[in-house]
Image: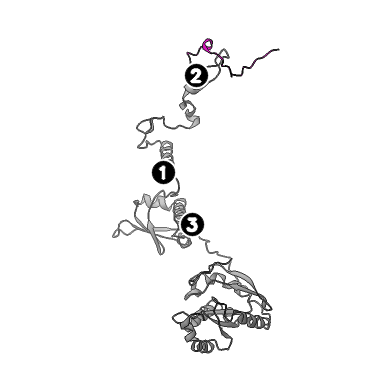
Amino acid sequence: RPKIANYPFTTIVPNLGVCDLGDEGAGLILCDIPGLIEGAAKGAGLGPAFLRHVQRCKVLLHMVDGTSEDPIGDFHTINKELKEYDPFLAEKPQVVVLNKLDVPEVQEMEEELMEQLRQAAGHSRVLSISAATTSNVKELMGRLKKFVESQPESDLPPIPEINLARAGLDFDSDDYEIINDPSYPGQWRITGEYIENTAKMTHWEYPEAVSRFGRQLDALGIATELQSRGARDGDLVMVGEFDFEFNPGLTNPYIPQELLEKDARMEAKRNGEKSPDDDDDDDDDGTAAWRPFNQGGFLDVDVGELVGFSESDDWELLDENFDDADFEFGEDDEVWTYSE
């Protein structure tokens, strides 16, 4: 079921359905797309992402919120965004619907709003309904089906040609520059087409995405270059219109701290350095520090708990003072015997 709520822009993905209200409107295919907002032609909101799929529709059903502060202004804004985004869509025939007729304020202004919408649309295909009470909905579907069936098949506009000689990310990732003004200590600006495009595609509201961007800075050598030029933890780093605090060695926030500390100790050992907690060979709980198996870790187990064979192929028992002469079977003990 589509997600519907009593607030604007609930729809975030297109919903495709078939209207089946008796004979009227039966078999009419409808597609509900996210609403357009001002600036949609330049990429604002979710609506533009799905407008390309609407090109196959014969008719546009333009819903106008009667409780809006300026319903007529909203109607003009949406049509303006449609025309700027795709003139082919703007020329498609429309049916205009004034919704929320169940609200008393809208009922009082119904005649005035309907007349203004007819003038703004330039045609008489305007109808008022109440989606909440389904008032006039059946009549709308019946009229809409007849109008859709009367529309001729139209050819889709040609697919725009794409210049594949240079793709959107066809830039050298190593082509970047780090700028630092001595007048503003602790501030660094990174320029370069690749890293700036990467920053634009990063969802900065998600910690995982920020962590991924930090790993990209490491992979490109930018983090190392910043450190070599004197950048410190907490310095301000700017990439395009985005800025963040420099955090060398940015790690996944979901890795437990004890694993990070163990990784730091192993890294220090590989580099021949001594980590701060290497002052003794025991952990805080008195147990021996962990060693890899191939570095003698197999000797760190408690050998007193091991049971094996001696040189005479006899069992080595845990209790050296054990004397089998003192052992007696109980009444319920099961005794195994062997005979040839």
Give how far across and how far down residue 268 sits, in percent. 40, 38
Separation of marks 3 and 1 at Cα, in angstroms: 32 Å
Per the image, the residue denoted by label 3 is: 173
Query: First in sequence: mark 2 or mark 1?
Result: 1
Stretch of the chain drawn in magenta: 316-340
Q: Which residue is mark 1?
A: 257
Tell me: residue 338, above or below residue 160: above
Q: Nearer the viewer, mark 2 or mark 1?
A: 2
- Note whether residue 160 is visible: no
Residue positioned 52% across, 73% down in the render: 35
Residue under numbered circle 2:
318
Q: Residue furthest left?
A: 183
Residue farthest front in this picture:
331
- The question of residue 331 being in magenta is answered with yes
Image height of 216 relative to 124, above or below: above
Q: Principal SS element in the magenta part? A: loop
Horizontal side, residue 124 vs residue 246: left or right:
right
| Secondary element at image label 2 | loop
* Along the viewing direction, whichever of 296 and 53 lies nearer the viewer: 53
Q: Quadrant of residue 20?
A: bottom right
Furthest toward the right, the residue is 340
- Specify the amino acid type for callout 1: Gln
Q: Position of residue 161 (x, y in %)?
A: 60, 71
